[in-house]
Amino acid sequence: MSNNRDYPRIVVPPPGPKARAIVERQDRFASTSYPKEYPLAVARGQGPMVEDVDGNRFLDFMAGIAVADWAIAHVDTTDTLRSVRALRFGGTPEQVPERYTTSSPITYAEKVEAPVLIMQGRNDTRTPPRSIEMYENKMKSLGKDIEVRWFDAGHGSLSVEQNIEFQELMLRFAYRILSSKVS
């Protein structure tokens, strides 16, 4: 990919034929425990650009898994997830603190230039809320544009109505930010 920004770029109306074929197979054989909001089949990504298997390029400004500080999340989670995280990081926060620090978004709060929206469950044991509370406080102390929406659930929501509300919040946030950039 060149250094010139060549996205967003739509070469075929999404989802294209390759993406549709993959999504159809996925719908038949993959677990239904992870709902797909959009039939996207990602081929690659770089920075904020995501390219699908049909060559369409999108601007990706949304993310999942709201862990702002992995060391705090390690302490605040379940024993099972502590074991998983220790395996992933090659040790506990006490054993390899630099790995947890360099993997934590809170470490880089000073460098954040874009507005941030986080939707976080108050009862989430996979991505516990305390690290988000600390991240929000740090971002606000730095004068950064951050909005945190709390909801009374765990890791996501199984409520269709709440998922629709989440999508609306994300779209309104994106619209607000993108509208402010138009001269």
Image: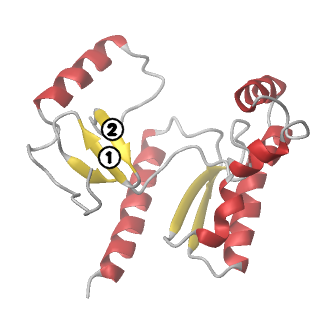
Q: Earlier in the sequence, mark 1 or mark 2?
A: 2
Please tell me the numbered disc located at residue 44: 2
| Above/below status of 63 relative to 174 | above
| Viewer-side residue, 116 vs 108 | 108
| Viewer-side residue, 76 vs 89 | 89
Q: Amino acid at mark 2?
A: Arg
Quadrant of the rendered structure where residue 136 is?
Answer: bottom right
- The colour mode here is secondary structure
Residue at figure coordinates x 84%, y 26% from the top left: 79
| Above/below status of 174 relative to 151 | below
Q: Position of residue 99 (x, y in %)?
A: 75, 42
Q: Regarding mark 2 in the picture, which secondary structure is present there?
A: strand
In the image, farthest residue toward the front: 2
Q: Position of residue 156 (x, y in %)?
A: 56, 40
Is 135 positioned to the left or the right of 91 in the image? left
Is 67 positioned to the left or the right of 37 in the image? right
Q: Regarding mark 1 in the picture, which secondary structure is present there?
A: strand
Residue at figure coordinates x 84%, y 38% from the top left: 96
Please tell me the numbered disc located at residue 50: 1
